[in-house]
Amino acid sequence: MTALGPVLRTTAFAAAPRCVHRGRRSRVMMEVIDVAWTRLFDPWPGDPWADFGRLRREMDDVFGRLVAAPRLGRGTPFPPVNLYETADGYVLTAELPGLQPKDVDVSIEGNRVTLRGERKIAVPDDQQTSLHRRERQSGIFRRTLELPQQADPEKAQAVYRNGVLWLHIPKAPEAQPRRIAVQGS
Amino acid sequence: MAKDIEKTTNPTPELEPRAKRAVEREPTRTGTWFRPDVDILERADEFVVVADLPGVDEQHVNVRLEEGVLSIEATPEREPDPSWTPIYTEYQTGGWQREFALSERIDAAKIQASLRDGVLELHLPKLDRHRPRTIQVQAG
């Protein structure tokens, strides 16, 4: 457990287009937004709406109602990731629904883990189809995460299951906790 | 009841997320529920609802149509091991839930659902009588 969180950066991220006018055909833009623009995305989960959502949930509880709230604010980088520390390493999880394992590229260099890939969403572009709602994000992504300690890339394992990537990364041998036997004199 | 909702909140489109409207429900479920992102398309003969449900497999999703309300409920099939220490968290895990008011133009018996790689796809066919038809104009 480290005092400081790992450094997260989003170097390229294409945002989903906002909701289009209901019941009207609109053009949907699907383009990669350049790096300078993506810096506007706050990579830290300091979502100003988070408290609002919590408050609303609490109110819903008070009134005995249940309204599911949107979980991530706009501007949350894609894919959202979680990092856990285990006894001998780290587990990085990322939500990447709708991708194929071959669409995700995972690389580990020292203590830096990079996820990159592209999430494609085919948007029909014909006169017969109208788009009422477009909330799912698509585009090219690349995220780099720094682990608090050196990792052992040789033994890392990545599993993609039901739209979630589970990446198990053991710590490098020198970063593993070591038990020192205390001997009697 | 469902019809009234449609009339007041659903003047033109056939699908209206009910996010703004509190859902009266017995507070029987525990845990945290989130609203999945969806895309909604309309074609000549059907509506397509695509919902991101990461972590969900076909055994953990429940799609229901009741009194004109289509509801999606799902839970992830795997949770992080409780022994792991979270050191950086961008997303919470919990259930997914979302409801839509459907108009009667949907053929409820023919709704098809499929789930793959954490993405739910629902095909909601329109009733035959509401499909657009081309009328041949004949010379008088």
Image (tube, coloured by chain):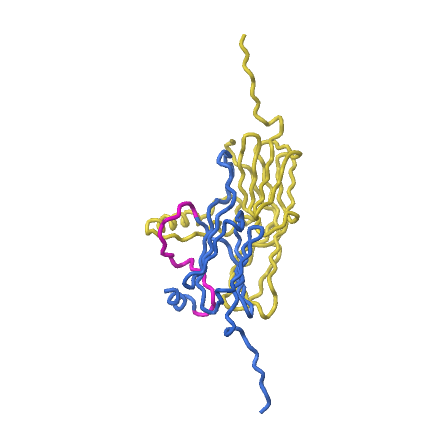
Horizontal side, residue A36 vs residue B87: left or right: right
Give the x, y percent position of residue A147. Answer: 58, 35
Side of B106 relative to A52 (left or right): right
Residue B19 falls within the magenta-colored stretch: yes
Q: Is residue A183 magenta?
A: no
Toward the viewer: A163 or A135? Answer: A163
Snapshot quadrant of residue A167: top right
Tell me: residue A89, above or below residue A68.
above
Counting from the top left corner in percent of width and height, residue A29 is at 59, 61
Which residue is pictured at 56% across the width and 25% down the height? Answer: A177
Residue B133 in picture, x, y percent from top left:
55, 77
Q: Residue at x 41, y 63 (%)?
A: B67
Q: In the image shown, does B60 or B37 lie closer to the viewer?
A: B60
Q: Is residue B99 left or right of residue A39?
A: left
Could you tell me which residue is drawn at 54 percent across and 64 percent down?
B41
Q: On the picture, is B137 further left or further right than B16?
A: right
Q: Residue furthest bottom?
A: B140
Q: Main secondary structure of the magenta part?
A: loop
State the quadrant of the C terminus of chain A: top right
Chain in yellow (letter): A
Name the residue furthest top: A185
Q: Nearer the viewer, residue B129 or A184?
A: B129
Residues shaded magenta: B11-32
Chain letter for the blue colouring in the rendering: B
How many labels, in total? 0
Q: Closest to the observer: A82 or B130?
A: B130
Where, by quadrant of the figure, is residue B43 drawn? bottom right
Q: Which residue reaches farthest left?
A: A63
Which percent across, then down, holds residue B77?
51, 45
